[in-house]
């Protein structure tokens, strides 16, 4: 039995499981939720460990396989999880990894702690929330195996089951269906996570296989971040090829990789930042440094060559139309995260390290590429001019003694009575008839209704210029009241919540996608500051007449339907709603509009690569690229990956 000591399991072992019991009692505390997002967390915990191993330089391939029995496996070509006896616990290290919370990091003294070592809760959480988990370690010519069942009970202790030449780790598990609202792994969700890792780890291959459908997809990027940008900027009009820089700061040992590209006809600034391969969705000191460095490089260049006419460019002028990926590897000693979700880098050194780095590199690049530099500065000057013009127009409007001019509202809008804008809600409703029902069911004080006739836009024919001339879109811009694009000012919005209300079918999803695309492109702050919502009408009404009274319950999914049947009791009837139009005003109010009882999804950008790419394709100049991509990639029933539930 080579180096495994025989272990006897005694009463002492019981405390090991206690931690896992806690995970089963309150899964959301560890994985955020027990819905689809939580389910996929189980996969990330395992994948991230394999990624860490590759990041430390062991193994260049990671395979994820969705199996027919509903389980999923992850295989790497690393050193294999250590199988020797851990002194503290007297058990094999690999067993500890799967039974103790946060145990993974203890055995890992890599310089850069990444995904798993940072905020990851560890593979033990995956074990705790699985029907079974099966582990094979290929190491020292042996195949080691152990298995847990029912949330972490060790049913097959570590043993050698064979010999082999390779090294690596294979972990396969089946999520516990009694814990999750769904145990169906989603190809798109996993593919997009693996692709993101592949962009960040050039030269490491990620292979995703679905045994049910026979689909296999490989992600391997030799040019990492350059391909990341090329991928998201598809269908845009770039000023130059992707520009990239990499280096390690001697003093701090902070490793920096940055890729960037400027595009015309884009006034957003899109920065994707990462620390040790974990996305820092709330930015932090590295983003601050990046912004400062880029701004100074361009400003200094413009000044040296006298390319601006007097007025100094502002940071926002310089970063309009910029897409960048900033990826840092920071030694554990210097790592600091902030914010509730730890999505913001706090490490103070990162400001100057990154700003000096990008200032030096980009300055040199500008000097070496004068034509690009001049084009860029012309673009910045144009942004500046547009910004100043917008401000001037606003100031003039204010200095007009007349009270602030009321926007002429469309006669399609049924306004809210209150002037307390933050409390007001705008419902953008699919179809005139549902609009009429919503009008009757609304709270007159705070809810406004704007019906949209049919699909507001056709993805096959939109172009940026035509878009804002589209009547439906123009009405939306006017109603929200804060301008759009460059002149959008979130301070001016007339509604605290903007709620898209469509039928729960493909057409409805199509309209949602189009509107979200529009908001993302032209009023991005509305999304990033959490103002955009999707109303979720119920799928079923379960009811019966009980004497003179009607007993009824609504259900949003099949699980809810079962519950509703029980609540209503024998003799129930079921209506299946096919659209908003089938509800009367009272029903629509109760189920979809009243803040006390409705279900809303708050739109957030959960998958930035997909969001950015989708928008660039849908809003891009080339209709044929758009059409091809839509046909191949957009399943309009899958846009839920962008949202989280709220009231
Ligand atoms: F998450 C997990 F535990 F389930 C898991 C871990 C899943 C998969 C697919 C792979 C892994 C994993 C862990 N692959 N490689 C490793 N490496 C280690 O655990 C390891 C190996 C050697 C040393 C060492 O210092 O010699 C240290 C570590 C952490």
Image (cartoon, helix red, strand yellow):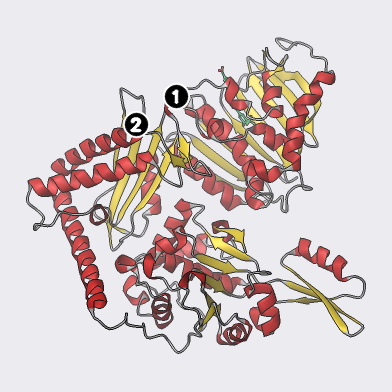
Quarter holding residue 10: top right
Q: Is residue 484 above or below residue 15?
A: below
Name the residue: 82% across, 67% down: 564
Element class at badge 2: helix
- The residue tagged with tag 1: helix, strand or loop? helix
Quadrant including the C terminus: bottom right
Of the four image quadrants, the one with ligand 1 is top right
Rendered position, 519 above or below 98: below
Q: Horizontally, is 213 left or right of 353 in the view?
A: right
Q: Which residue is mark 1?
A: 333
What's the residue at 70%, 17% (across, down)?
92
Q: Is residue 438 above or below residue 192?
A: below
Task: Residue at 76%, 42% (x, y): give it.
Answer: 25
Nearer to us in this view, 613 or 549? 549
Taking the image as shown, residue 442 lies to the left or right of residue 605, namely right
Q: Which residue is mark 2?
A: 349
């Amino acid at each position: 039995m080579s180096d495994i000591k025989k272990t006897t399991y005694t009463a002492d072992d019981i405390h090991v499981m206690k931690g896992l019991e806690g995970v089963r009692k309150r899964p959301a505390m560890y994985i955020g939720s027990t819905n689809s997002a939580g389910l996929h967390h189980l996969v990330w915990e395992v994948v991230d460990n394999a990624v860490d191993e590759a990041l430390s330089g062991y193994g260049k391939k990671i395979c994820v396989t969705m199996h027919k029995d509903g389980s999923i496996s992850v295989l790497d070509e690393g050193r294999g999880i250590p199988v020797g006896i851990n002194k503290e616990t007297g058990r094999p290290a690999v067993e500890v990894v799967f039974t103790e919370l946060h145990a993974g990091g203890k055995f890992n003294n890599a310089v850069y702690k990444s995904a798993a070592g940072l905020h990851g809760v560890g593979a033990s959480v995956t074990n705790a929330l699985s029907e079974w988990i099966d582990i094979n370690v290929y190491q020292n010519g042996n195949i080691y195996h152990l298995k847990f069942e029912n949330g972490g009970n060790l049913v097959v202790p570590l043993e050698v089951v064979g010999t082999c030449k390779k090294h690596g780790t294979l972990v396969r598990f089946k999520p516990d269906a009694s814990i999750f609202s769904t145990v169906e792994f989603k190809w798109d969700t996993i593919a997009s996570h693996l692709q993101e890792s592949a962009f960040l780890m050039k030269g490491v291959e990620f292979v995703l296989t679905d045994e049910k459908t026979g689909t296999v997809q490989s992600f391997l990027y030799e040019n990492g971040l350059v391909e990341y940008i090329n991928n998201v900027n598809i269908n845009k009009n770039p000023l130059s090829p992707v520009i990239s820089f990499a280096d390690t700061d001697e003093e701090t040992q902070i490793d920096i990789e940055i890729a960037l590209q400027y595009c015309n006809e884009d006034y957003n600034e899109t920065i994707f930042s990462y620390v040790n391969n974990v996305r820092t969705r709330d930015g932090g000191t590295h983003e601050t440094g990046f912004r400062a460095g880029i701004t100074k490089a361009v400003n200094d260049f413009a000044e040296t060559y006298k390319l601006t006419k007097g007025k100094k460019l502002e940071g926002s002028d310089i970063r309009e139309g910029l897409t960048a990926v900033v990826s840092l590897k920071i030694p554990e000693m210097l790592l600091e995260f902030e914010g509730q979700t730890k999505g913001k880098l706090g490490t103070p050194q990162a400001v100057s390290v990154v700003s000096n780095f990008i200032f030096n590199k980009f300055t040199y690049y500008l000097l070496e590429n004068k034509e690009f530099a001049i084009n860029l500065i012309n673009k910045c000057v144009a942004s500046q001019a547009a910004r100043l013009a917008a401000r001037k127009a606003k100031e003039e409007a204010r200095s007009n003694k007349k009270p602030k001019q009321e926007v002429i509202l469309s006669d399609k809008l049924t306004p809210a009575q209150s002037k307390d804008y933050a409390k007001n809600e705008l419902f953008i409703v699919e179809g005139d008839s549902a609009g009429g029902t919503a009008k009757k069911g609304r709270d007159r004080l705070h809810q406004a209704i704007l019906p949209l006739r049919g699909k507001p836009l056709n993805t096959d024919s939109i172009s940026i210029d035509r878009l804002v001339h589209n009547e439906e879109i123009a009405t939306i811009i006017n109603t929200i009241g804060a301008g759009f694009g460059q002149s959008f000012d979130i301070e001016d919005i007339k509604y605290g919540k903007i709620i898209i209300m469509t039928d729960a079918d493909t057409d409805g999803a199509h309209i949602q996608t189009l509107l979200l695309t529009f908001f993302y492109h032209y009023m991005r702050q509305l999304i990033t500051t959490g103002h955009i919502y999707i109303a979720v009408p119920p799928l079923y009404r379960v009811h019966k007449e009980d004497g003179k009274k009607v007993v009824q319950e609504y259900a949003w999914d099949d699980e809810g339907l079962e519950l509703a049947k029980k609540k209503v009791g024998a003799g129930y009837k079921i209506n299946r709603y096919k659209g908003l139009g089938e509800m009367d005003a009272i029903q629509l109010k109760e189920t979809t509009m009243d803040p006390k009882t409705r279900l809303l999804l708050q739109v957030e950008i959960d998958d930035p690569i997909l969001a950015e790419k989708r928008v660039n394709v849908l809003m891009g100049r080339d209709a044929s690229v758009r059409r091809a991509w839509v046909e191949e990639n957009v399943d309009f029933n899958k846009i839920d990956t962008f949202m989280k539930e709220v009231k």
